[in-house]
Amino acid sequence: MDEGQNTTTAGRIAEAIGERIISGTLPPDAPLRQDHVAHEFHSSHVPVREAFRQLEAQHLVVAVPRRGVRVAPLDTKSVKEIAEMRAALEVVALRNAAPKFTSAHLARIEVALVEGDNAETVEEFEMANRAFHHALVAPCAMPRLLASLDGLQLANSRLVFAMARNAGWRPRPSQDHRVILQALRARNIEQACSLLARHIQTIERLALPAA
Amino acid sequence: MDEGQNTTTAGRIAEAIGERIISGTLPPDAPLRQDHVAHEFHSSHVPVREAFRQLEAQHLVVAVPRRGVRVAPLDTKSVKEIAEMRAALEVVALRNAAPKFTSAHLARIEVALVEGDNAETVEEFEMANRAFHHALVAPCAMPRLLASLDGLQLANSRLVFAMARNAGWRPRPSQDHRVILQALRARNIEQACSLLARHIQTIERLALPAA
DNA sequence: CCATCATAGATTATCTATCATAAAAACGGG
DNA sequence: CCCGTTTTTATGATAGATAATCTATGATGG
């Protein structure tokens, strides 16, 4: 699930800070001072700066020259944006992945599905959700597309955690995932694609109930 | 057109190296040694490392830990991948941008169109092509989507320049662009979107003639 | 004799530590 | 409320240390 980029200290720092941003431990707009981070991770400021660049590329922080970086803001407009991008790209990925599906792939999708149904906490649910969507698209073997989707998934998780903190969260079975899997088992790729697109846009509507 | 990130040394280095990669001055798989780059830009290795991270995020170089970075390879599979991603995302962007079009926007699109028709070199044509597509999507006001499209445009330019070097290039008027503009003037957004998607996939077919 | 493996040296990425500079923020009179 | 000073902090330079990789040479075994 993780890329194992933790071989270098910069990667390790980026991973740790990124996790804090996604989980909400670091709130939006919080400033990140490089000397403080360097001291915390027992390193110098050079790898910290590299980690900041990585996080900037993931849109998890925003950097303004000569003023350092701060946690990226979390506004409702980006919810819609991320949902639309995810819907468009995941459909492309699924269309390319579905013809390659083996029964092992479908089994892995189902595992993620039931893990999501059995989730007790938001964290467990989000992990299973990420696994489900990842299993859907991974066989497409398009590295750049998968990297983009990874970044969008991360941003989406951040939104989910923020909403859960604000509005509470209770486990609910994801019927959407189940019907997508059914369509895939029936080899009805186009139906699965349109179900997937609608599913992703549904998450957006869940985030902005009154809009 | 450029974001003016050249306020910092790392940004300046990343911009310069990126331009060389896109233009083909730096061939695929060429190694980039940080001390060499630092010496060339009269800087230390610290901003060079940051620049490498930026280029890595743009998929212009690939970094392997403890072995430095090299120019990203250029294979035919990524041509298809980039075209599919661009087609999907530009359609989303255009669908959000088109309702906001003013006559000034349409005029800017037409300027880029005729500049493409009058282009004498690949470089001129590519610059006009980028301007055309950018003008199409910019009014959507979705920063993350626009950043993604910028990166895909860059990768696409790199492919265009590589093909031009291999197979020659001669100016040709882009009828595709004209009919897209016509559909937009007629406020037929859905037609413009499907024309745009087909246009982008056409570029892919142009890159892989026999496939 | 050739192939495979091992070891030594050179190269280079990575990181630390310290310092210098400059820009922005904070503060404090007028 | 504005202007200058101080403090903080990002940015970058430099020197050096460590470790991983690459290269090349030599040894061992078939």
Image: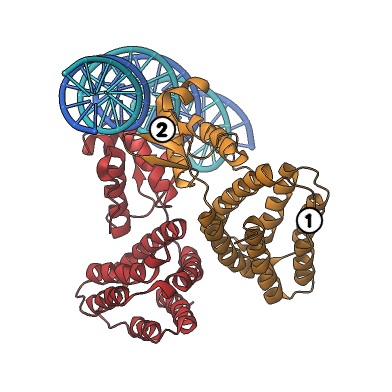
Chain colours: A orange, B red, C cyan, D blue
Q: Residues within 10 Å of mark 2 (few under 14, many from 20)?
A: many
Work out which quarter of the rendered image holds the C terminus of chain A and state it: bottom right
Q: Please identify the quarter of the rendering in which residue B67 is found.
A: top left
Element on which disc 2 rests: helix
The image position of residue A199, as x and y in percent, is 68, 65
Name the residue carrying label 1.
A113
Q: Mark 2 lies on which chain?
A: A
Q: Which residue occupies the foreground of this view, C24 or A194?
A: C24
Q: Please identify the quarter of the rendering in which residue A139 is found.
A: bottom right
Tag 1: residue type?
Answer: Leu
Up-down relation of residue A155 to residue A80 (above or below): above
The image position of residue B205, as x and y in percent, is 44, 77
C-alpha span from label 2 to label 1: 38 Å
Q: Residues within 10 Å of mark 1 (few under 14, many from 20)?
A: many
Q: Can residue A42 be seen in this view?
A: no
Q: Please identify the quarter of the rendering in which residue C4 is found.
A: top right
